[in-house]
Image: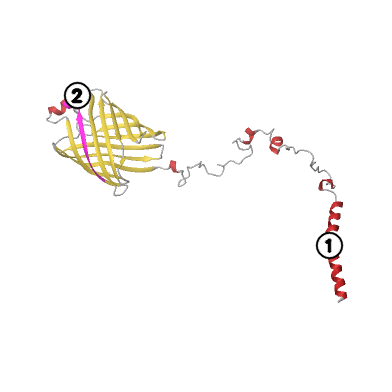
Amino acid sequence: MNRTLIIGVAAISTFMAAPRAWAQTTQEQPAAHDQQTPPGMVMPDPQQPATASPRPSDTTMAGMDMGAMQSSKPAADARDTDAYSDGYVNSTLPGYEMADRLSVSKVLIDEAEFTTNNQGQGFSWSGAISNGPDNNKLWLRSQGLKQAGEQLDPESSVEAMWWHAQRPYWGSLVGVRQDIGPGAHRWLAAGIEGLAPYWFDIQLTGYVGDDGRLAARLKATYDVLLTNRLIATPQLETNVYSKSSNDRKLGAGLSNLELGLRIRYEVERKIAPYIGFVWERSFGKTADFRRAVGENPTERRFVAGFRIWW
């Protein structure tokens, strides 16, 4: 019993003396900044304010020529990228052309319609065939009107055009025009075609005829989406001539003005039946020619047809 008590008192005395020994050991150790530092290393003085050291970019990049870093010229000993292409350059390898260099064909029958008015029934058409890449295309386009018991409308024609892109939404046209029907003439043609602001599709073409006449044709259309598939398309067309043509029954000056509205339903994107109404008015001597054969200078037509492309 006495032996156990002696051992307990000794353990308590040792435990009470341990904190004092640990405190003395801590006071005898030097401060961190007083310790010996490795050769070549300078430790900051805690009594002095810290100063910013220069950034590597301020010293190592100050004398570098930024123009040299941005140069796009290859090195003098760079390998020729076309050395093993067998004469093919960029996108000329068949089957591997860039998208805007692909030759794409398209057939658009914009109007194939039956017409009816107080003078009888008839048939009207307007369409184009194109082939070529995005910036150069060959166009074949035609339009015309044939009323029952009458000759072809004097504006009926076929045109072969070369279209060249000038802007993202505009291109120039150069080609020839051949009239269809009695008294047909040939014309040299030049003009522009494109998408005007607010999505108006514009065609403006000038002509020089083989008889010395000058002419111009303006067509403008605009698609109004009533729904994603039901689309209303107002259209304007007018023709101007410098001199009268007795064989084609066309007068000098403003020959005609045609306003139309067609509403189509796209059963598929490539097939769309439509109905519409067309108002046309002849002016000047052209109106006189029509009166001379018993026709009204003002014509109203109801139309129904198909718009197809592929």
- Disc 1 and disc 2: Cα gap in Å? 127 Å
Q: Which residues are magenta?
A: 273-287
Quadrant in the picture for residue 190: top left
Quadrant in the picture for residue 150: top left
Q: Position of residue 148 (x, y in %)?
A: 15, 38
Q: Position of residue 293 (x, y in %)?
A: 12, 29
Name the amino acid type tagged 2: Gly
Q: Which residue is mark 2?
A: 284
**Label 1's element?**
helix
| Left or right placement of residue 169 versus residue 261 in this view | right
Q: Quadrant of the N terminus?
A: bottom right
Name the amino acid type tagged 1: Met
**Label 2's element?**
helix
Mark 2 Cα shell of 10 Å, populated few (<14), some (14-19), many (≥20): some
Q: Which residue is mark 1?
A: 16
Q: Position of residue 204 (x, y in %)?
A: 32, 30
Q: Earlier in the sequence, mark 1 or mark 2?
A: 1
Q: Give the number of callouts.
A: 2
Residues under numbered marks 1 and 2 in contact, where contact means CB atoms less than 8 Å apart:
no
Q: Along the line of sight, which residue is nearer the eye, 215 or 283?
A: 283
| Left or right placement of residue 5 versus residue 73 in this view | right
